[in-house]
């Protein structure tokens, strides 16, 4: 019996070789019909024996191309059957049936059609093994071609202009195919079959050095020379420019720090291959798999104690941020046979002014990166969407994304939403630190690539342009805009302006509530939960600075239950960097008559500075009431001598964590405790049966200060602080769960990037029989709050 079936497959099915795959499966079974891109789905008309058509359909779903992600599928007879029906703007089965009668004699790949409806965009894909092999194959026509790619790898999202994904709707539309590439494009047996970005040395983009008569391999070779001689290069990649130098050249690394005015924040490195990674770093299998995955993120790995890489790459840090080459250019930088020897590890840090978005074109690179670099290597393939490198740590063997960008954006999340019958499009603009925005469509949530910190005016421009690009790609216009509550945030101002221009509602969502919602969103959990949102700062519902929130939360709202003892945060924005000021402010409550002497003994500051900060806190001059856990971490770090003043966000807390972890590692013997029994008992006494245990953080701080003044081991005290604060946190969550009947906790906020603190809190909650939601592929830091904001807007009645 001959069956005629209409098949629609939704998901990441464009730009990943799906149509050629369908043709091969159909041809192998003698099925007639066609396949074409339609909107962001693949539509198939299949005619043949019923058992073969069903077998083909099952094969499409069970063994798709490696980079494809199938979200859902439909199969129906022409005019009915199992289909849920055409989406808005799509043809019906009768329309396809009429088209199928046009004398099809085989199975064809048809020209793409544009329709409205849901969109799934492929992220950029790191170079595959086959292309990496072909790149250095002297007999291959793409030998040393720096833009080699195939259906399984290469740029996607960063070069996409509009749907459906075809060459003319991408940056590659500017490069007409040569006859040989055209032949491969039509050849079903070629890896370049139906590849929209197919190109070669004769017809593809080209690298060059702006302002110099250097192109192609000559330009790449010159960059290699500069790096080999200790220079710094700005190099255009998939989603933007990198600043690059030898990781073994201490002078070059320190020069880059000096030029970029980045004294201590770790640089990422790119290593030539896994052998290099294993030589320099300790790795587990799951970390190796992440490094080699098509997303090619930066993965945080523990350094080996071996000579080689400059200490200035990641000073005072036991870890390195490592990635493997993910573009053909990277492989050529390491291995081009031009008679020069380059190291197998290169610093590869974002090409930007600190805090600003990554540069993507010659104009930006010449203006912003020329002061940092000795040479610029660019190319004439336009980057349409910026995409910085994604950054990943691991917790309990699972990914813990710190920056979600290239390789992951703009893959959607499926959200839990109430069955209200309302499906509004929501635009959420996140916060001002680590800004990302998010757009919803139906029950799908599309987080953007990383934008940057909104303190730089360029980030505001990039945010607005990024929103316009995403709206254009998704063919959506927001019906509601969500932002943070902070009256001074640039993202809030942009939300207000956009809402006024579009004449749509603008709703402000409390910062820490958005953190908890983002954790719920990633876990597909509709609540309610007891949430713990710990971070550096967030505008509170009472106008003060929050940052240690225990709250009851669901999709409709929250109730604040507990927080640390408030203190006066002195110095405005500078106070967030100067942990010693928070420490002095806390000291004035416990040592009011001895603040000068105590501050000097702890080497926090001079007696005069301590008196000034104390007076400012007492009178409220340039001071705000704060319950920020981040500032508490900073204050303890300053008291214990790890970091008095941060040069980048999170530095003080990070060094405190490293000190605690070094103590834990050196003290673990058998199953015994690693803290003195007296300290454990003191910490347990802080946990109140009634009332808020976290309000006891002033006493915890005093205990740390007194122990430091007695000369106790600072690393031990760092671990004690983490341990005691986790006890207080677990105590308040446990009480909230008991009183509410809720048995699920959600942990979010930048403080939970600290995997030691996260582990201690989670272990304590699990012992209490409480289920724990944590982050994995959505950052727990402010890079994730737009997802939470968006989820709130999606669930408004």
Image (cartoon, helix red, strand yellow):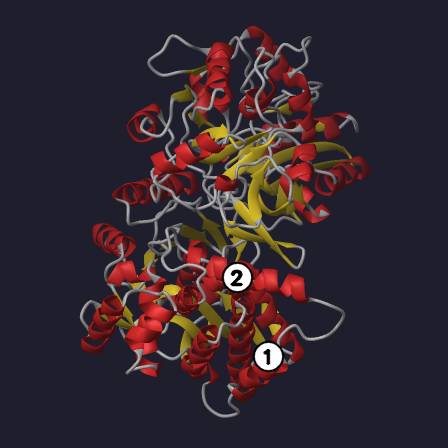
Q: Which mark is residue 657?
A: 2
Q: Mark 2: which secondary structure?
A: helix
Q: Secondary structure at mark 1?
A: loop
Tell me if residue 218 comes above or below residue 446 in the rendering. Answer: above
The structure residue drawn at horizontal position 31% and vertical position 64%, both measured from the top left corner, is 605
Quadrant in which the C terminus appears: bottom left
The quarter holding residue 382 reads: top left
In percent of width and height, residue 379 lies at 43, 20
Identify the residue shown where x is 53% and y is 71%.
717
On the question of residue 104 being in view, the answer is no
Residue linked to disc 1: 743
**In x, y percent, where is residue 554?**
47, 73
Q: Nearer the viewer, residue 327 or 462?
A: 327
User: Quarter holding the N terminus?
Assistant: top right
Image coordinates for residue 106, horizontal then vertical, percent: 70, 21
Please name the residue shown 54% across and 61% down the image: 659
Instruction: Tell me the crowding category of disc 2: few under 14, some 14 to 19, or many 20 or more residues within 10 angstroms, Cα based.
Output: many
Considering only vertical position in the picture, is 491 above or below 195?
Answer: below
Specify the quadrant of the image occupied by residue 582. bottom left
């Amino acid at each position: 019996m001959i069956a005629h079936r209409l098949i629609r497959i939704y998901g990441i099915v464009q730009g990943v070789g799906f149509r050629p795959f369908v043709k091969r499966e159909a041809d192998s079974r003698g099925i007639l019909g066609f396949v074409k891109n339609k909107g962001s789905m693949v539509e198939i008309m299949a005619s043949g024996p019923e058992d073969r058509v069903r077998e083909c359909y099952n094969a499409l779903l069970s063994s798709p191309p490696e980079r494809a992600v199938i979200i859902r599928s439909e199969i129906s007879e022409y005019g009915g059957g199992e289909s849920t029906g055409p989406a808005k703007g799509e043809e019906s089965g009768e329309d396809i049936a009429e088209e199928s009668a046009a004398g099809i004699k085989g199975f064809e790949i048809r020209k793409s059609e544009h329709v409205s409806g849901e969109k799934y965009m492929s992220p950029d894909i790191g170079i595959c093994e086959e292309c990496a092999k072909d790149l250095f194959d002297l007999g291959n026509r793409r030998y040393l071609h720096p833009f080699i790619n195939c259906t399984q790898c290469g740029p996607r999202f960063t070069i996409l202009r509009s749907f459906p994904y075809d060459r003319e709707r991408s940056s590659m539309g500017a490069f007409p195919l040569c006859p040989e590439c055209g032949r491969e494009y039509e050849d079903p047996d070629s890896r370049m079959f139906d590849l929209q970005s197919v190109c070669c040395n004769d017809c593809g983009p080209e690298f060059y050095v702006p302002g110099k008569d250097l192109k192609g391999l000559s330009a790449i070779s010159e960059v290699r020379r500069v790096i080999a001689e200790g220079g710094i290069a700005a190099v255009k990649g998939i989603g933007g420019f990198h600043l690059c130098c030898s990781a073994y050249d201490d002078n070059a690394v320190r020069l880059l720090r000096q030029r970029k005015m980045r004294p201590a924040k770790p640089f990422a490195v790119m290593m030539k291959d896994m052998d290099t990674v294993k030589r320099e770093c300790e790795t587990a299998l799951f970390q190796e798999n992440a490094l080699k995955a098509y997303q090619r993120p930066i993965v945080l790995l523990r350094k080996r104690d071996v000579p080689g890489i400059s200490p200035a790459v990641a000073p005072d840090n036991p870890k390195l941020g490592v990635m493997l080459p993910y573009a053909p250019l990277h492989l050529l930088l390491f291995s081009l046979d031009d008679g020069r020897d380059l190291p197998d590890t290169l610093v590869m840090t974002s090409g930007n002014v600190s805090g600003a978005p990554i540069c993507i074109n010659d104009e930006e690179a010449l203006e912003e990166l020329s002061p940092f670099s000795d040479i610029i290597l660019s190319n004439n393939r336009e980057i349409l969407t910026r995409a910085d490198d994604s950054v990943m740590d691991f917790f309990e063997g699972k990914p813990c994304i710190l920056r979600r960008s290239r390789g992951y954006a703009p893959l959607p999340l499926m959200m839990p939403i109430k069955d209200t019958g309302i499906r509004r499009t929501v635009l959420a603009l996140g916060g001002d630190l680590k800004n990302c925005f998010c757009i919803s469509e139906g029950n799908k949530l599309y987080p953007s690539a990383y934008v940057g910190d909104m303190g730089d005016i360029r980030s505001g421009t990039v945010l607005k342009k990024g929103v316009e690009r995403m709206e254009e790609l998704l063919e959506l216009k927001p019906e509601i805009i969500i932002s943070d509550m902070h009256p001074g945030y640039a993202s809030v101002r942009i939300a207000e302006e956009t809402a006024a221009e579009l004449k749509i509602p603008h709703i402000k969502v409390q910062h820490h509530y958005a953190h908890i919602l983002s954790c719920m969103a990633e876990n597909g959990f509709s609540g309610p939960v007891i949430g713990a949102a710990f971070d550096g700062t967030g505008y509170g519902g009472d106008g003060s600075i929050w940052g240690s929130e225990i709250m009851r939360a669901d999709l409709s709202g929250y109730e604040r239950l507990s927080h640390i003892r408030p203190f006066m945060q002195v110095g405005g924005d500078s106070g967030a960097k100067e942990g010693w000021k928070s420490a002095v402010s806390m000291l004035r409550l416990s040592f009011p008559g001895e603040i000068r002497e105590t501050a000097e003994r702890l080497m926090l500051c001079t007696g005069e500075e301590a008196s000034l900060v104390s007076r400012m806190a007492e009178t409220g001059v340039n001071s705000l009431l704060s319950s920020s856990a981040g500032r508490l971490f900073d204050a303890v770090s300053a008291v214990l001598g790890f970091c008095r003043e941060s040069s980048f966000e999170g530095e003080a807390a990070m060094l405190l964590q490293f000190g605690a972890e070094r103590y834990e590692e050196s003290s673990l013997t058998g199953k015994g405790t690693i803290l003195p029994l007296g300290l454990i008992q003191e910490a347990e006494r802080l946990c109140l049966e009634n009332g808020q245990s976290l309000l006891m953080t002033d006493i915890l701080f005093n205990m740390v200060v007194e122990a430091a003044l007695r000369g106790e081991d600072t690393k031990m005290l760092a671990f004690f602080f983490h341990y005691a604060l986790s006890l207080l946190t677990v105590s308040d969550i446990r009480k909230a769960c008991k009183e509410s009947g809720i048995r699920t906790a959600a942990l979010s906020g930048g403080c939970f990037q600290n995997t030691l603190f996260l582990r201690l809190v989670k272990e304590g909650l699990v012992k209490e029989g409480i289920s724990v939601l944590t982050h994995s592929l959505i950052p727990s830091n402010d890079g994730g709050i737009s997802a939470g904001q968006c989820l709130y807007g999606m669930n408004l009645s």
